[in-house]
Image (tube, rainbow, N blue to C red):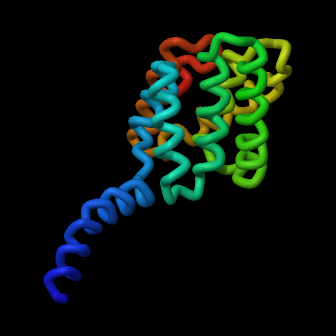
Amino acid sequence: MKTRIIFALLLLLPGAVVLSKNIQQKLDKAAFYEVMDRGNLDEVEKEMDIVVNSSSPEKEGYTGALLMRKASLVKLPSQRLKFFKAGRIKFDPAISADKDNVEYHFLRLAIQEHAPKIVKYNKDIEADKQIIIKAYKNLSPAVQNAIKDYSKKSKVLIASDLN
């Protein structure tokens, strides 16, 4: 009888370890920003799984940003609009609830700068830029690197603004 119990536990243990890892995935901000920057659909979807399964209190905001990024990667206009709206529904309440979250302002600035005019998502660009510039030196190195890299391509946020 003991042998059967031990055997059953040995069979279940690997599955429990995999399940535990999936449930407690840690959000790697450097990887998150790389995925946002590269814009690869498969990577965005994988990163969404990581974010959704993370314990990060910011996961609604990050999920919303990823959905809006995904919108720019799908081909059908109806799918683009669907993902953008779904992302906005998650992201906007997150930034409203945490107005001091500079990362949210950075994500919103990047999304607004590239959002099509038809979705009318461009009203906070200047305010977000000022918040980012003001708080830049207090951010984690991973976020600072993401902002610095973004500023090299941005028409709104210039690298010299960050010094």
Q: Is residue 148 above or below residue 5?
A: above
**Which residue is located at x 64 percent, y 32 percent?**
67
Q: Which residue is situated farthest in the bottom direction here?
A: 1
**Which residue is located at x 40 percent, y 44 percent?**
28
- Residue 62 drawn at (x, y percent): 59, 42
Q: Nearer the viewer, residue 37 or 147?
A: 37
Q: Which residue is situated farthest in the left direction here?
A: 3
Residue 48 left/right relative to 1:
right
Q: Nearer the viewer, residue 44 or 7?
A: 7
- Residue 48 drawn at (x, y percent): 53, 39
Residue 52 visible in the picture? yes
Q: Is residue 153 above or below residue 102?
A: above
Q: Is residue 113 above or below residue 5?
A: above
* Total numbered labels placed on residues in the image: 0
Residue 163 visible in the picture? no
Q: Nearer the viewer, residue 77 or 128?
A: 77
Residue 152 left/right relative to 70:
left
Residue 45 left/right relative to 19:
right
Quarter holding residue 66: top right
**Which residue is located at x 63 percent, y 16 percent?**
74
Residue 118 left/right relative to 41:
right
- Residue 158 drawn at (x, y percent): 56, 17
Quarter holding residue 149: top left
**Which residue is located at x 83 percent, y 20 percent?**
119
- Residue 76 drawn at (x, y percent): 71, 12
Quarter of the image with the N terminus is bottom left
